[in-house]
Image (spheres, grey):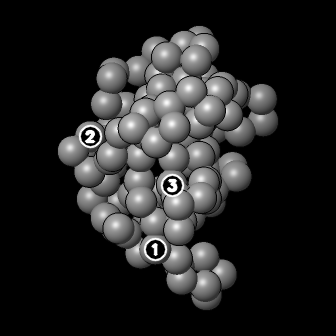
Amino acid sequence: MYDLKICNKKYEVEAFKTSYQKGEGLAVVLENEGEEFAVITTNLPGNKTAKDCAFIDNNNCKWAEDFLVKHNIAHPTNRCVLSGFWIYPEYRFDLTKLKDYETQETSKKKNDIEM
């Protein structure tokens, strides 16, 4: 469990790894009390990454980069990609700190993250 504070509200979250259906890149999902809280990565299938890297959705999860570094879950690679009007930073994850999402109702959850 990791602590997360957003707008002065505290959450206890679990971090999970899975993959996107299109592009098969690393997807990272946070859960709070067994419910999906946030998908903190974004799928940019035209931009390949290493298996332990992903682009962070700092557009919708502005707190994600601080959270990842604070808990030593991931660190920036200094690579960024422009998509639309936003620049997404790439992070390298310590995959040992992420649980496997597939063990949690595999098909339903993976289909929900097909972005």
For mark 2, what is the residue? 95
Q: Position of residue 26 (x, y in %)?
A: 44, 29
For disc 3, the neighbor class at 10 Å (few under 14, some 14 to 19, many from 20) is many
Q: Do the residues labelled 3 and 2 touch (CB within 8 Å)?
A: no
Q: Residues within 10 Å of mark 1 (few under 14, many from 20)?
A: few
Q: Residue beneath label 3, please?
A: 30
> Is disc 2 surrounded by few (<14), some (14 to 19) or many (20+) residues within 10 Å?
some
Q: Which residue is drawn at 71% across and 39% down?
A: 86
In this figure, which residue is indicated by the disc labeled 1? 12
Which image quadrant is residue 41 in? top right
Residue in the foreground of this view, choosing between 4 and 109: 109
Question: For residue 38, what is the image quadrant?
Answer: bottom right
User: Which amino acid, mark 3?
Assistant: Leu
Mark 2 residue element:
helix
Q: Which mark is residue 93?
A: none
Marks 1 and 2: CB-CB under 8 Å?
A: no
